[in-house]
Image: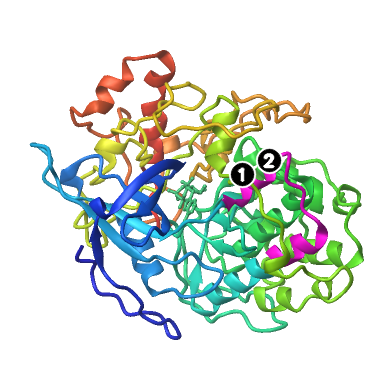
């Protein structure tokens, strides 16, 4: 594959060997269904080594190679750290059938026995505090490396943290990552401030920090630190700690937990574009200490510094590594002392529950050659949007899993873990639309999470204009569409639409989501 040349950020070494043929691997089982592909376990025939192969789907060959995949490959090629997943090589599957002209590409990474989400969902697995400390330290080291090298991950969550049976944790999934153009965080100085705008359409909702929910565009590595805080809490609770059902609900439960924003706790919050609906919330003093009674003083201090509303002061990865929590008893476990567990991946969780998670729309990203930066071709139609709807590359494509909540027949690779007892959770949506004021509360139909008898919030007020299709203020990458949505090609998406009422509705939503181009 001829990936475009990229200068590695300072301090990052080039390390990459090239391409092999897919025939050199024996496929074993499906591990995950990702945003732009599927992840399979595979064995290298010659060496017997086990790898994970992430297949990059191109739903329409004319669209070319997805820019998100290209970005992930470019970044991973340059990164080299014990706590960042390594891209070993690319594997190519040449077209064998008539009609398919392009090769299918696979990203080859070392096989990791678990992702943290799958592991936490396995009732046979119990984390001790020294083990949690060991994982959190590794996470902070990986984040420090990324941030030191001007990289924002922008999708920190348990499912993107891979763990092997030698106690090693690695940050994976760089599909949303990007270069950060600002000075890097300094010891004792929080995460600093950004000078340029970035898109707020990043981070899976349950791990999304308050400043992004309020649509701060000049965000910093602090967004990844918030996600790390959510993961820290999740390791104790064994489930996501902030499972919002809409962006507004997400903001509400955040402020209930850490206290309402004010000029002391979150300076400047009230002037952010998304602040208005938050001003209607009931005031809260927060309940973090009550919710995390199991944490000692140092643990609670670290958690509250990670979940600090003020993104400028939120603890950075350098200081998190040095936090007293890791220096006080019980000390972090050594990686080699961590017990081994049966393989657990997030897909197991979904399959075990007989439920297809509401797969959130992926960042549309674009395709190579789709525009000056691969994001927008100026024709009123996103280069890949006609085929992927909202940029959710899983819809309508050969790997179409149907709309959320609609079961599809199990594929040959699907598997169930030995544990299968609990009720399904709400789908962990990763929608990329931040505007709660645009009537786009896509998941308001979802039931409250188990154990939370909360009613869905009423729809927030509309901002007017063309509603869902309106670009957030200042977002020059977002085209507007006419009321009928963008022109659609006669691809399989049209056929999909007629299958069920649910499916008929989905493309509309997806059309809205197509407006999201990642910056
Ligand atoms: N190297 C690996 N070893 C084992 N499992 C892996 C590996 N890479 C990915 N997976 C599994 O596949 C899942 C999806 O992978 P990944 O997050 O890279 O794809 P994605 O397209 O970005 O997915 P998503 O859209 O869900 O974030 C992971 O949560 C994990 O369970």
Q: Is 477 placed left or right of 465 in the picture?
A: left
Residue 118 numbered mark, or none: 1
Relative to the observer, which residue lies in front, 68 or 183?
68
Residue occupying the point 30% across, 56% down: 67
Instruction: Classify residue 402 as left or right of residue 343.
Output: left
Q: Quadrant of the C terminus?
A: bottom left
Q: Position of residue 230 (x, y in %)?
A: 70, 54
Under 8 Å from ligand 1: the CB of mark 1?
Answer: yes
- What residue is shown at x 58% (from left), y 58% (from top)? 164
Element under disc 2: loop
The dominant secondary structure in magenta is: helix
Q: Quadrant of residue 295?
A: bottom right
Q: Tell me if I can see residue 256 in this picture.
A: yes
Which portion, as a residue range, is magenta? 114-136
Please tell me which residue lies in front, 189 or 30: 30
User: Is 269 in front, or is 194?
Assistant: 194
Q: Residue at x 56, y 56 (%)?
A: 162
Secondary structure at numbered mark 1:
helix
Q: Which mark is residue 201?
A: none
Residue 519 in view in this figure: no
From what the image shows, is residue 363 above or below residue 429?
below
User: Quarter-wise, where is residue 324 in the image?
Assistant: bottom right
Q: Which residue is mark 2?
A: 122
Q: Is residue 111 above or below residue 84?
A: above
Give the image location of residue 166, x and y in percent.
62, 63
């Amino acid at each position: 594959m001829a990936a475009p040349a990229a200068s590695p950020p300072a301090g990052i070494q080039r390390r990459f060997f090239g391409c092999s043929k897919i025939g050199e691997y024996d496929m074993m089982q499906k591990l995950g269904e990702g945003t732009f592909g599927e992840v399979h376990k595979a064995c290298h025939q010659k060496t017997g080594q086990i790898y994970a192969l992430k297949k990059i789907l191109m739903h329409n060959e004319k669209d070319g190679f997805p820019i998100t995949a290209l970005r992930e490959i470019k970044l991973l090629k340059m990164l080299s750290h014990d706590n960042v997943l390594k891209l070993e090589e690319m594997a190519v599957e040449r077209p064998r059938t008539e009609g398919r002209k392009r090769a299918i590409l696979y990203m080859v990474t070392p096989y990791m026995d678990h992702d943290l989400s799958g592991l936490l969902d396995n009732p046979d697995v119990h984390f001790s505090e020294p083990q949690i400390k060991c994982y959190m330290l590794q996470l902070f080291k990986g984040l420090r490396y990324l941030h030191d090298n001007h990289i924002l991950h922008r999708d920190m969550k348990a499912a993107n943290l891979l763990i092997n049976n030698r106690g090693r944790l690695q940050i994976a999934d760089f599909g949303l990552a990007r270069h950060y153009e600002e000075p890097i965080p300094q010891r004792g100085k929080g995460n600093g401030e950004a000078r340029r705008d970035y898109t707020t359409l990043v981070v899976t909702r349950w791990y999304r920090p308050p400043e992004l929910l309020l649509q701060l565009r000049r965000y910093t590595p602090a967004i990844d630190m918030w996600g790390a805080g959510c993961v820290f809490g999740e390791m104790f609770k064994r489930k996501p700690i902030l499972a919002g059902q809409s962006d507004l609900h997400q903001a509400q439960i955040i402020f209930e937990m850490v206290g309402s924003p004010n000029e002391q706790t979150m300076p400047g919050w009230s002037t952010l574009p998304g602040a208005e609906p938050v001003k209607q919330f009931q005031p809260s003093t927060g309940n973090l200490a009550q919710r995390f009674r199991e944490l000692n003083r140092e643990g609670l201090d670290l958690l509250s510094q990670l979940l600090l509303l003020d993104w400028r002061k939120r603890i950075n990865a350098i200081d998190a590594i040095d936090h007293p929590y890791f220096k006080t008893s019980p000390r972090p476990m050594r990686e080699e002392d961590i017990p081994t567990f049966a393989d657990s991946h997030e897909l197991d969780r979904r399959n075990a529950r007989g439920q297809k998670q509401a797969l959130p729309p992926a960042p549309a990203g674009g395709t190579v050659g789709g525009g000056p930066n691969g994001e927008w071709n100026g024709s009123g139609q996103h280069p890949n949007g006609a085929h992927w709807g909202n940029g959710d590359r899983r819809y309508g494509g050969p790997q179409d899993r149907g709309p959320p909540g609609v079961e599809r027949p199990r594929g040959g690779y699907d598997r169930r873990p030995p544990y299968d007892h609990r009720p399904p959770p709400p789908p962990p949506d990763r929608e990329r639309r931040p505007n709660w004021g645009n009537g786009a509360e896509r998941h308001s139909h979802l039931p409250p999470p188990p154990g939370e008898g909360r009613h869905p919030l009423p729809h927030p007020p509309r901002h007017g204009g063309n509603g869902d299709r309106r670009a957030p203020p200042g977002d020059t990458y977002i085209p507007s569409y006419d009321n009928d949505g963008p022109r659609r090609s006669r691809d399989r998406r049209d056929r999909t639409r007629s299958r069920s009422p649910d499916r008929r509705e989905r493309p509309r939503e997806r059309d809205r989501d197509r407006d999201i181009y990642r910056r």
